[in-house]
């Protein structure tokens, strides 16, 4: 049985994706070549410098270089430890509900891992830059899922996040009234963040396939819900969808936690391909 022919619009999108992939490949090759040329130039300069020295001067040069390297590593290690400590102690809590993993395909699960990697990287960068962070909590993470993710996402085993096998209500026992499940279907707009509330983001990749899943789960658990301010009164999406990835939702929360209003947070975080326009500036 032959598959249905693609429409003109689908063919146009397919061609555009292929062009973008080709451009990305060419850009990576160019950047790699520039790095190689730079390192080769530095190597030649280093060899010429060493050749101009006496043996005693070379030994002194190498010893000083080793000492500088050790000092730099020590500072980097201390900086990493400080950043991780600050993330772990952040007051604003954001929970990624990973209980959805059993409904995801392997491809979707791998995509979710990447989104969580982007999420942690954004929080780490914020804290390292002297801004507020978020305390990340991953619930519904069984041993197999944790092992799979830590195997596929380099360094994730050392993230200062809470890895919990518990389900939502078990993890936040006694805090049910503080839980806010963020879902696109909610009629309540999230106006501002509160350190007393825990914002839950569903660990879902293809929300069209699991349409309404987060709203249904929140209703089943008796949790309050909210959605981000993405209305046409303040923002206009000229392309793409207003349904966001896990990392985009968390990054918008991160910007809001650092004092940005919702409009500025959204326009800063979302990629240009979504064509987000601030209607107040039109």
Image: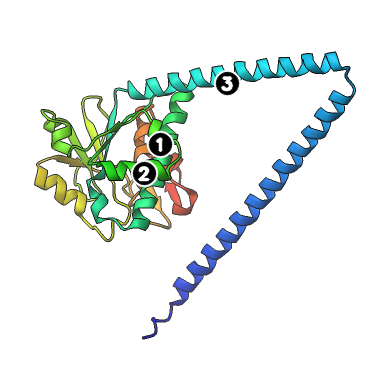
Residue that numbered label 3 is attached to: 73
Disc 3/disc 2 C-alpha distance (Å): 27 Å
Residue 100, labelled with which disc? none
Residue 36: image quadrant is: top right
Q: Alpha carbon of mark 3 to alpha carbon of mark 1: how far?
A: 20 Å
In this orientation, which residue lies closer to the viewer: 274 or 136? Answer: 136
Q: Does 60 appear above or below 18?
A: above
Task: Please report the residue visible at 33 percent of the width from the left and 50 percent of the height from the top.
Answer: 232
Percent position of residue 145, x then y: 30, 45
Q: Is residue 203 left or right of residue 8?
A: left
Mark 1 and mark 3 in contact (Cβ < 8 Å)?
no
Q: Quadrant of the N terminus?
A: bottom left
Q: Say which residue label 2 marks.
A: 149
Q: Position of residue 184 (x, y in %)?
A: 25, 49
In three-dimensional space, the C-alpha distance between marks 2 and 1, rounded to whole angstroms, equals 8 Å
Task: Rate crowding at label 3 as few (under 14), some (14 to 19) or many (20 or more) other CA atoms within 10 Å.
Answer: few
Q: Are marks 3 and 2 in contact (CB under 8 Å)?
A: no
Other residues around mark 1 within 10 Å, as few (<14) / some (14–19) / many (≥20): some
Single out the residue that lies furthest toward the bottom.
1
Quadrant position of residue 136: top left
Q: Are marks 2 and 1 in contact (CB under 8 Å)?
A: yes
Residue under label 1: 156
Whether residue 91 can be seen here = yes
Disc with the residue nearer the chain's start (3 vs 1): 3
How would you rate the neighbour count of disc 2 (Cα within 10 Å): few for under 14, some for 14-19, many for 20 or more? Answer: many
Asked whether the viewer can see residue 280, the reply is no
Q: Is 157 rendered above or below residue 50?
A: below
Q: x, y (%) of residue 202?
A: 26, 45
Residue at x 37%, y 24% (from the top left corner): 87
Q: Residue at image x 76%, y 42%?
A: 37
């Amino acid at each position: 049985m032959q598959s249905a022919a693609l429409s003109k619009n689908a063919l146009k999108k397919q061609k555009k994706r292929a062009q973008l992939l080709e451009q990305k490949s060419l850009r990576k090759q160019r950047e790699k070549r520039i790095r190689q040329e730079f390192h080769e130039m530095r190597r030649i300069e280093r060899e010429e410098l060493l050749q101009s020295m006496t043996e005693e001067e070379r030994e002194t040069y190498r010893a000083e270089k080793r000492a500088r390297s050790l000092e730099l590593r020590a500072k980097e290690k201390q900086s990493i430890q400080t950043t991780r400590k600050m993330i772990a102690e952040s007051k604003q809590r954001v929970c990624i509900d990973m209980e959805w993993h059993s409904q995801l395909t392997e491809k979707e699960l791998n995509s979710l891992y990447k989104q969580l990697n982007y999420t942690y990287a954004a929080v780490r960068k914020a804290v390292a830059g002297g801004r507020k962070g978020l305390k990340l909590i991953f619930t519904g993470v069984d041993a197999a899922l944790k092992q799979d993710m830590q195997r596929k996402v380099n360094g994730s085993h050392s993230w200062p996040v809470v890895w919990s096998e518990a389900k939502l209500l078990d993890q936040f026992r006694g805090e049910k009234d503080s839980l806010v499940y963020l879902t696109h279907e909610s009629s309540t707009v999230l106006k501002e963040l509160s350190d007393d509330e825990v914002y839950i983001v569903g660990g879902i990749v293809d929300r069209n396939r699991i349409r309404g899943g987060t709203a249904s789960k929140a209703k089943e658990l008796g949790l309050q819900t909210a959605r981000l301010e993405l209305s046409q009164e303040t923002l206009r999406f000229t392309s793409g969808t207003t349904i966001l990835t896990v990392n985009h939702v968390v990054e918008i929360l991160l910007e809001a936690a650092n004092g940005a209003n919702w409009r500025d947070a959204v326009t800063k975080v979302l990629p240009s391909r979504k064509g987000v326009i601030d209607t107040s500036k039109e």
